[in-house]
């Protein structure tokens, strides 16, 4: 990915004056992308709508966004939002390595990765593990439908043991719980949501966008073509009947209206590094998302009880991210002149001499 010379943002003057604008003067439409080619009703498209809404509400600069993905129906999502942003569609399961390079090349970009359960938990699991271990500064969305949608609905590694396929065969292996895995690996932001729950998903994405390290968002996203039948635990019906939200979540940026109201009573506020804050109002559990032991207990309990628990499990905004740990210069490496990035032979000779 080459370093962007940032063009100025459109004035929005081509939009009718009545359309609402965010703090950059952009309308929701400015955050749109190419028309989706996914099946009608696919959960992934609802996540796209939530991503667009969150990016608009949060006033994300489209020219400062890098959308990263792998391969799968889910990985096509990055084409369907913020068309003015940068983007890279990597090899299957290899998005984290490309994102790592992009983060080092230009650490001023906001990185959003979109992957699938196959792309992440099957072929890409090694890459996922190291992106978390390094606290790569990115929002990592897994559009989790329990199957390889693009290749006709085989079970993925997140399908529960005993889950039935559309054709009636049974999954013999235990499924991987991506939130549990992320917590064990030290992820600094871990949440689960449901593609049909936009009210919860939008503030979760906004919170993730304002996190300084890796923000893992496991979003259950029904595949209407291959995994939306009666025996599925990743269908719309199952999700709607079983979803148990931990809390009512909101996100407030410094430029949001000061009178944004989130009800009182059992409310936690989590300040974010850039001055924004996450607001949480207790719903089903007494859980403080700054408490990792409690997060692990809840995720494990939900897994044991076959419950579909959603919300923000854990957040820790204090840990340095991968780029901070690298002690990079302030200017993006990608825009440094060759005279700085390629020292002349005389400098290399000096280095070699110092080893003699
Ligand atoms: C190296 C490699 N192996 C296998 C494939 C075939 N393939 C394409 S997408 C995919 C699975 C995608 O599943 P998932 O990430 O869950 O996305 P979904 O389509 O379900 O959204 C597979 C196995 C490939 N493209 N490249
Ligand atoms: S096959 Fe499944 S995952 Fe792929 S677009 Fe269709 S509904 Fe979505
Ligand atoms: Mg899938």
Image: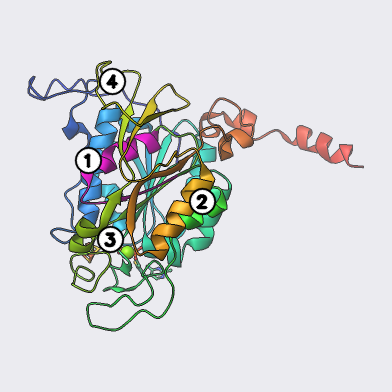
Q: Is mark 3 within 8 Å of ligand 2?
A: yes
Q: Is residue 157 left or right of residue 34?
A: right
Nearest the viewer among 203 and 265 is 265
Which labelled disc corresponds to residue 256? 4
For mark 4, does the 10 Å Cα neighbourhood hold few (<14), some (14 to 19), or many (20 or more) residues? some
For mark 2, does the 10 Å Cα neighbourhood hold few (<14), some (14 to 19), or many (20 or more) residues? many
Which labelled disc corresponds to residue 199? 1
Q: Position of residue 216 (x, y in %)?
A: 43, 47
Nearest the viewer among 191 and 294 is 294
- Read off the residue under disc 3: 73
Residue stretch in magenta: 190-209
Calculate the distance from the C-alpha at mark 1 to the C-alpha at mark 3.
24 Å
Quadrant in which the C terminus appears: top right
Calculate the distance from the C-alpha at mark 4 to the C-alpha at mark 2.
31 Å
Does the segment drawn in magenta span residue 116? Answer: no
Q: Position of residue 166 (x, y in %)?
A: 22, 77
Q: Is residue 275 left or right of residue 246?
A: right
Residue at image position (22%, 47%) is: 197
- In primary-sequence order, the first of circles 2 and 3 is 3
| For residue 306, above or below residue 140 | below
Which labelled disc corresponds to residue 183? 2
- In primary-sequence order, the first of circles 4 and 2 is 2
- In primary-sequence order, the first of circles 4 and 3 is 3
Calculate the distance from the C-alpha at mark 4 to the C-alpha at mark 3.
34 Å
Calculate the distance from the C-alpha at mark 4 to the C-alpha at mark 1.
17 Å
């Amino acid at each position: 990915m080459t370093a962007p010379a940032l063009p100025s943002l459109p004035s929005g003057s081509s939009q009718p004056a009545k359309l609402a604008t965010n703090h950059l003067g952009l309308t929701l439409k400015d955050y749109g992308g190419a028309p989706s080619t996914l099946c009608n009703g696919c959960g992934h498209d609802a996540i796209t709508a939530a991503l667009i809404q969150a990016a608009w509400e949060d006033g994300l600069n489209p020219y400062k966004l890098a959308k990263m993905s792998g391969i799968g129906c889910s990985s096509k999502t990055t084409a369907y939002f913020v068309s003015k942003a940068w983007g890279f569609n990597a090899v299957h399961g290899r998005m984290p390595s490309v994102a790592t390079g992009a983060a080092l090349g230009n650490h001023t970009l906001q990185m959003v990765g979109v992957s699938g359960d196959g792309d992440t938990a099957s072929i890409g699991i090694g890459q996922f593990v190291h992106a978390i271990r390094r606290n790569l500064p990115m929002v990592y969305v897994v559009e989790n439908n329990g199957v390889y949608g693009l290749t006709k609905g085989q079970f993925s590694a997140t399908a529960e043991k005993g889950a039935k396929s559309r054709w009636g065969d049974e999954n013999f292996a235990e499924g991987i719980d991506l939130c549990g895995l992320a917590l064990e690996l030290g992820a600094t932001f871990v949440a689960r949501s449901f593609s049909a729950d936009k009210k919860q998903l939008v503030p979760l994405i906004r919170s993730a966008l304002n996190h300084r390290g890796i923000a893992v968002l496991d979003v259950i996203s029904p595949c209407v073509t291959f995994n939306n039948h009666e025996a599925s635990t990743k269908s719309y019906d199952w999700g709607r009947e079983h979803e148990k939200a931990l809390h009512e979540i909101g996100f407030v940026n410094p430029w949001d209206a000061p009178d944004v109201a989130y009800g009182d009573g059992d409310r936690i506020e989590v300040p974010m590094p850039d001055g924004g804050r996450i607001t949480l109002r207790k719903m089903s559990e007494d859980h403080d998302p700054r408490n990792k032991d409690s997060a692990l207990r809840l995720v494990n309990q939900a897994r044991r009880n076959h419950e579909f628990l959603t919300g923000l499990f854990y957040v820790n905004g204090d840990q340095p991210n991968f780029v901070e740990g690298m002690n990079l210069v302030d200017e993006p490496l990608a825009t440094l002149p060759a005279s700085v990035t390629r020292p002349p032979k005389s400098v290399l000779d000096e280095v070699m001499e110092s080893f003699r």
